[in-house]
């Protein structure tokens, strides 16, 4: 429940400092950039397969919009990782990632396990698109 505090009561409860406290922020997600590029490539590959299989003039604009959504979504996340201030962390290199792995909520993962976990859904989606392409080709 909220209650109204006077300025004097608020000053008694709050600690006011002249300079804001600097906090370290890690926006790198702990994964190398190559995994994100592979994910984007797999999603765009699925859109490309669907565009190739079902393309007609009426679908040109929706395909461009879908591809734009994928690029913008990952582009925004990439921009967010480089935002300042207080962003001291950089994405790890492949060597650092292979040596350290990554901590997740389900436990520590090696680099290979993390790569499989990150790329599993995009690979399955692309395989699904290829299966649809094969079905359409044989009908």
Image: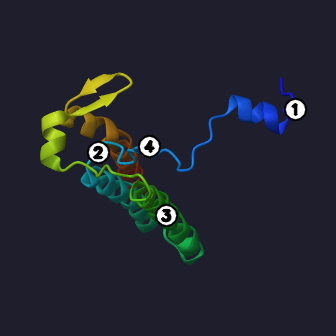
Labels 2, 3: front one: 2
Q: Secondary structure at mark 3?
A: helix
- The structure residue drawn at horizontal position 43% and vertical position 59%, both measured from the top left corner, is 84
Q: Nearer the viewer, residue 101 or 53?
A: 101
Q: Nearer the viewer, residue 106 or 135?
A: 106
User: Upstream in the sequence, badge 4 or badge 2?
Assistant: 4
Q: Position of residue 58 (x, y in %)?
A: 60, 74
Q: CA distance from mark 1 to mark 3?
A: 43 Å
Q: Is residue 8 left or right of residue 131?
A: right
User: Upstream in the sequence, badge 3 or badge 4?
Assistant: 4
Mark 1 and mark 4 in contact? Answer it, CB < 8 Å.
no
User: Upstream in the sequence, badge 2 or badge 3?
Assistant: 2
| Label 2 sits on residue | 31
| Label 1 sits on residue | 4
The reply to whether residue 118 is in sight is yes
- The structure residue drawn at horizontal position 17% and vertical position 34%, both measured from the top left corner, is 100
Mark 4 and mark 2 in contact? Answer it, CB < 8 Å.
no
The reply to whether residue 139 is in sight is no
Q: Is residue 89 left or right of residue 85?
A: left
Question: Which quadrant would the N terminus be assigned to in this image?
Answer: top right
Q: Position of residue 133 (x, y in %)?
A: 39, 55
Q: Which mark is residue 72?
A: 3
User: Upstream in the sequence, badge 1 or badge 3?
Assistant: 1
Mark 1 and mark 3 in contact? Answer it, CB < 8 Å.
no
Q: Secondary structure at mark 4?
A: loop
Q: Which mark is residue 23?
A: 4
- The crowd level at tag 3 (other Cα within 10 Å; few <14, some 14-19, many 20+) is few
Q: Is residue 39 left or right of residue 22?
A: left
- The crowd level at tag 1 (other Cα within 10 Å; few <14, some 14-19, many 20+) is few
Residue 114's place in the image compared with 65, above or below, is: above
Residue 25's place in the image compared with 107, above or below, is: below
Q: Is residue 133 left or right of residue 113?
A: right
């Amino acid at each position: 429940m909220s209650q109204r505090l006077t300025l004097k009561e608020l000053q008694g409860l709050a600690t006011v400092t002249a300079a804001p406290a600097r906090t370290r922020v890690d926006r790198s997600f702990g994964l190398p950039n190559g995994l994100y590029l592979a994910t984007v490539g797999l999603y765009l590959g699925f859109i490309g397969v669907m565009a190739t299989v079902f393309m007609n003039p009426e679908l040109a604009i929706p395909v461009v919009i879908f591809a734009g959504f994928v690029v913008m979504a990952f582009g925004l996340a990439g921009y967010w990782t480089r935002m300042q201030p207080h962003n001291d962390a950089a994405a790890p290199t492949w060597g650092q990632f292979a040596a350290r792995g990554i901590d997740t909520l389900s436990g520590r993962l090696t680099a290979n396990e993390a790569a499989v976990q990150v790329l599993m859904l995009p690979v399955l989606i692309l395989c699904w698109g290829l299966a649809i392409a094969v079905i359409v080709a044989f009908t």
